[in-house]
Every structure is written in C-alpha cells, then in structure tokens.
Image (cartoon, grey):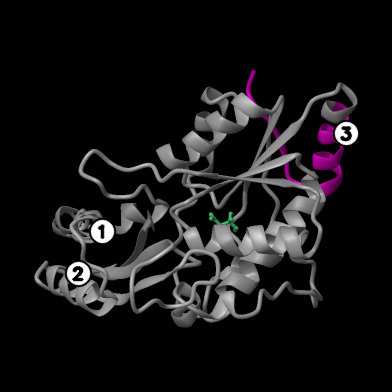
Amino acid sequence: MPPLIATTIPDCRAAIHTAKSAGQRVGLVPTMGALHAGHLSLIERARAETGFVVVSIFVNPTQFGPKEDLSRYPRPFERDVELCSQAGVDLILNPTPETMYGYDFKTYVEIHDLQNVLCGASRSGHFRGVATVVLKLFNIVQPDIAFFGQKDAQQALLLSRMVRDLNVPVEMAICPIVREPDGLAMSSRNVYLNASERTSAPVLFRVLSALRYAVVAGERDVAALIGQTTALIAATPHMRIDYIAVVDCDTLTPLTLVHGNVLVALAVFVGATRLIDNIMLVV
Ligand code: PAF
C-alpha cells in the first residue's frame, strides 16, 4: 500500500491516533527528503522495531544560514514517495514552512556549549534550527522511537541531550553510517559533486581509516594525528578543510591525547560542497 501523505498537522495527528488506537508503536524517521540508502536503512530499522513508520520530509529553513543551499537543496518529492512506498512507510509528513512556523514564530531550542562547536562553529544557528524543528516533529508525531544517522554525529548527540534535558518521551535510535562501496558516506549533498570531485571525495573516509590505524598502532598525540590527516586531505584535489576534530564523545571537548570514548569528526569542502564524516574510537 502506498503511504498516506499528510501536509497538515491535524491530518498527521489523525493518522497517528488511528495507528496508536490499534495498539501500534510509532517510529519516526525525520528527513529533509532526497532520500538515499542511508535514510532507507533508518526506515528499515524503524520497520523492524515499530508497527507504524512515519517519515517526515521537510527542508527546514531555520537550519540553513543565509549563504547556504536552502533554495537549491534537492527536492525530488515524487521519487521520495516512491522510495517510501517500496520501503513500507505508512505515513509521510510533508508540511510547508508556513505550516511548521506560521508567520510569527518566536520559540527556539538552544543546546548550550554543544551547539557552537565543530559544525556549529561555521554554521551559526544551524543546531538551534535542527533542535527546534525536531522538537516540533516530536510534538506533532509523538513517536515511541525516533531514528537518526550517526553520520550527523553532533546532531545525534545534541538531540539526545535535548530529549534528556527536556524529558521528551521518545527513545532515540542512532544508526550506523551507510557508505558507498568506495567509502564515501551517503549524503543528499553528494549529488552536488561533479565527476572529478566525486573521485576525490572518498579520501575523507580513507583519512579517517588511516587515523584509526595510527591510533591502533599506538599514536595518541592528537596534534600529530590531525597533522597527518590534514596533509593527506590537502594533497587531494578540490579539498578545503573546514575542521578536523578529535573530541570527547559526550562533551565534544577537544582532546590533546586520544583516550576514552572519542569522536573524530571532519567537515571538508569538496569543491563548493561541504561534506561531513566521522568515526568513533574507544581507547
Ligand atoms: O538530518 C537531517 O536531515 C535534518 O537535520 C533533520 C534531522 C531532518 C532536521 O531537519
């Protein structure tokens, strides 16, 4: 059966009320559309763990900076509906910006400290927009479980923190990164890469893997690890580093020595396209 499509909040709530009345657990996969295998893995997990799967497709304006790609962000809605249909999604929530934000919106969620580092340092206001829209989606859908990808590691951490701090009654499921055969992390923004940039892009996962091997071989000095990683990226065509960070997984505090639960995260412009990737280390 093709999924129901709700563009209004009352329609969405009515469909979810029916599912919950029938005793089904509701899973939510929040997306901005342009679905790829990474999203499909979240939907598959939602299917396995809940009885009624909701995918929200909403390109959220409040998480884009004024010079970012809001207007050209891919919106292949019919293809997304087809993919959701094949994946067994029950309901697509596809609201307009006006439905989500009205004309006089004033309330935002801030996650202090965590929101202004790593991606937040160069994308001012980004995580405030993400947290706000996700809390709204949680309030509209009231899912039992929400599914997010580990590729956006900082987003996953912030949202988990928001859920904890604000007592939001939802279970967070953070799912592994899905990669192309050459290691490039799946992203809706990969479609922006031209052929030559696409050839260079897998270096991001190669440098993260090389860093992991260096740590396994005994290197603990973060400055040395970042130096090697920077050199490898700089030697690849089209690359401009935004950041490479080795931080504590929970606090995002920069480390000088690799120890404990560690997140190695990077953001790199490949041509004009900013891509992110990360690995976790337990040392
Ligand atoms: O990860 C994304 O696609 C977005 O940040 C999200 C969580 C759907 C909020 O707009």
Q: Is residue 248 left or right of residue 90?
A: left
Range of residues picked out in magenta: 1-18
Disc 1 vs disc 2: Cβ atoms closer than 8 Å?
yes
**Camera-nearest residue between 251 and 67:** 251
Residue under label 3? 17
User: What residue appears at the point 23 percent right and 69 percent down from the top-left corner?
Assistant: 271
* Mark 2 neighbour class, 10 Å CA radius: few under 14, some 14 to 19, many 20 or more: some
Position in image of residue 190 (x %, y %)? 32, 53
Residue under label 1? 208
In primary-sequence order, the first of circles 1 and 2 is: 1
* Mark 3 neighbour class, 10 Å CA radius: few under 14, some 14 to 19, many 20 or more: some
In primary-sequence order, the first of circles 3 and 2 is: 3
User: What residue appears at the point 27 percent right and 49 percent down from the top-left corner?
Assistant: 184
Residue under label 2? 229
**Camera-nearest residue between 66 and 171:** 171
Residue 97 can be seen, yes or no: no
**Camera-nearest residue between 221 and 6:** 221
Look at the numbered disc 1 and give the secondary structure of its residue.
Answer: helix
Residue 65 can be seen, yes or no: yes
Vertical relation: 206 (above or below) 82? below
User: What residue appears at the point 29 percent right and 69 percent down from the top-left corner?
Assistant: 268
For this orientation, the residue located farthest to the top is 1
Name the quadrant where ligand 1 sits. bottom right
Gap in angstroms between the C-alphas marked 1 and 3 = 44 Å
Vertical relation: 180 (above or below) 227? above
Quarter of the image where one finds residue 246:
bottom left
Going by the numbered disc 1, the residue's amino acid type is Leu
